[in-house]
Image (cartoon, helix red, strand yellow):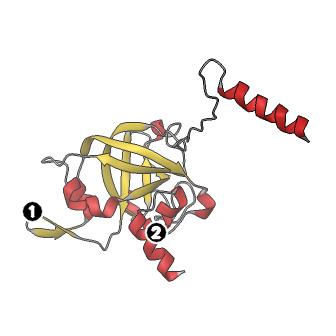
Amino acid sequence: MTGIFNTALIGLFALSGMGGHTAFATTTAIAPIEPSYPSYTVAMTGYNAVAAQTDGDPHITASGAFSNPDIIAARSQDLAGELPFGTVIEVMAASSSPNCGYGLVDQQVGLRVIGDSMHSRMRNKIDILFDMQDTVRAGGKETNPAIALGVCKRVQIRVVGKIDMKNIPTTQTGLRLAVGILPKADEQLLAVYK
């Protein structure tokens, strides 16, 4: 037993005395890699699910999804490669101007699922679906958000995720949960109800 003890003791001195270097292991915490999604600069308008503004059945989008004004957006056909159906977008920056009333409707936009398509003559544009019954105050009178939004140019949008078109959430909270960007306050509120 003394032989084993002496060997271990010699090994300890040998390691601690080697060139004045101390051997130790280091660990590095690696932050999770956030997915990198693209951003685009587009024009933005609003629409309602009514026969005059849609093709065929106004309650069914080009993707076959229900026309839910809380979460659906359309895109011009030239953006089909960049923004296929099921792409979830967030409006990052839109400046209000005489023709763009984004500041009047920004609270109603939130995240949007690309679930509809615009007429082929439209280019580099998204169209936000609004509820026909909703109103906002614009110019001293109540008006539909699609009209109040007007035409916004040079709008920054960002892709924040993709979802299966067969399982589209019906609310903003559900959509935020589906793409993993639910605000912490909402997560805590949901935990209370579970």
Looking at the rendered image, the quarter that the C terminus falls into is: bottom right
Q: Residue furthest left?
A: 140
Q: Residue furthest top?
A: 19
At mark 2, the secondary structure is helix
Compared with residue 174, is residue 12 higher up or lower down, i.e. above or below? Answer: above
Residue nearest the viewer, comparing 76 with 194: 194
- Residue beneath label 1, please? 139
Compared with residue 100, is residue 153 higher up or lower down, i.e. above or below? Answer: above
Q: Which of the marked residues, 1 or 2, is nearer the chain's N terminus?
A: 1
Badge nearest the viewer, 1 or 2: 2
Q: Is residue 120 left or right of residue 194?
A: left
Q: Dot 2: few (<14), some (14–19), or many (≥20) neighbours within 10 Å? A: few
Compared with residue 48, is residue 31 higher up or lower down, i.e. above or below? Answer: above
The residue shown at (43%, 66%) is 172
Q: Residue 37's spot in the image, x, y percent?
A: 48, 40
Quadrant in the rendering for residue 125: top left
Amino acid of disc 1: Gly
The residue shown at (40%, 38%) is 39
The residue shown at (38%, 47%) is 126
- Residue beneath label 2, please? 187
| Residue 160 seen in the figure | yes
The residue shown at (24%, 47%) is 151
